[in-house]
Image (tube, rainbow, N blue to C red):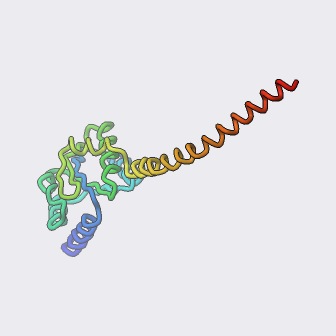
Amino acid sequence: MDRTEKREFIAQLSAVFADTSFVLVAQNKGLTVADVSDLRRRMRGAGATYKVAKNRLATLALDGTRFQGVQPLLKGPTALAWSKDPVAVAKTAVEFARGNDKFVILGGALGTQTLTPDGVKALSELPSLETLRAQLLGLIQTPATRIAGVLQAPGSQLARVFSAFAKKDEAEAA
């Protein structure tokens, strides 16, 4: 990589860090090409990006961003993962780390907050953004459904009472 390519790479990575909400740092020592391909596929499926970058270039790209807290983690063979949905990255990484001992989560940053590996694991246990949206929508719709049920109940109860009187009258007439 020559200097021009390095500058472009740093500019691209800086732009990504300005636009994302979560950055994960992991150690990828000893991962096979198949393992890395599988991890990238999973990350892409979760709407995240996984990239192996030179530590020095990543450090330069992190300068001036809100994720500067992860700079000390960039030692040895590391990789970065990021997404706008922090839970998706954390879930995918923690799930992959359970099945592969060579993939070690070093930490991450959620905005200006630096996370330890335990913090990333705790983040992965939260429901995803889509699940939270669905739950919120369900909470909003539930009162409307209950109100409709309450408003319909008196009418249906009256109909049952009238029906019972009608059946009683028919039974007495017969």
Tally of numbered discs: 0
Q: Residue at x 31, y 41 (%)?
A: 125
Query: Going by the picture, which residue comes out furthest to the bottom?
Result: 4
Query: Going by the picture, which residue comes out furthest to the right?
Result: 174
The quarter of the picture where residue 66 lies is: bottom left
Q: Is residue 121 above or below residue 23?
A: above
Residue 112: give x, y in percent of width and height.
Answer: 18, 58
Q: Is residue 76 above or below residue 101?
A: below
Viewed as shown, does residue 106 lie left or right of 157?
left
Taking depth in this image into account, of 64 and 142 the one nearest to the observer is 142
Q: Quadrant of the C terminus?
A: top right
Q: Quadrant of the N terminus?
A: bottom left
Residue 32: give x, y in percent of width and height.
Answer: 31, 45
Residue 168: give x, y in percent of width and height.
Answer: 78, 27
Viewed as shown, does residue 66 lie left or right of 88?
left
Taking depth in this image into account, of 50 and 31 the one nearest to the observer is 50
Residue 104: give x, y in percent of width and height.
Answer: 23, 43
Query: Going by the picture, which residue comes out furthest to the left?
Result: 72
Q: Is residue 72 above or below residue 167?
A: below
The quarter of the picture where residue 74 lies is: bottom left
Taking depth in this image into account, of 148 and 90 the one nearest to the observer is 148
Q: Residue at x 21, y 44 (%)?
A: 119
Taking depth in this image into account, of 10 and 32 the one nearest to the observer is 10
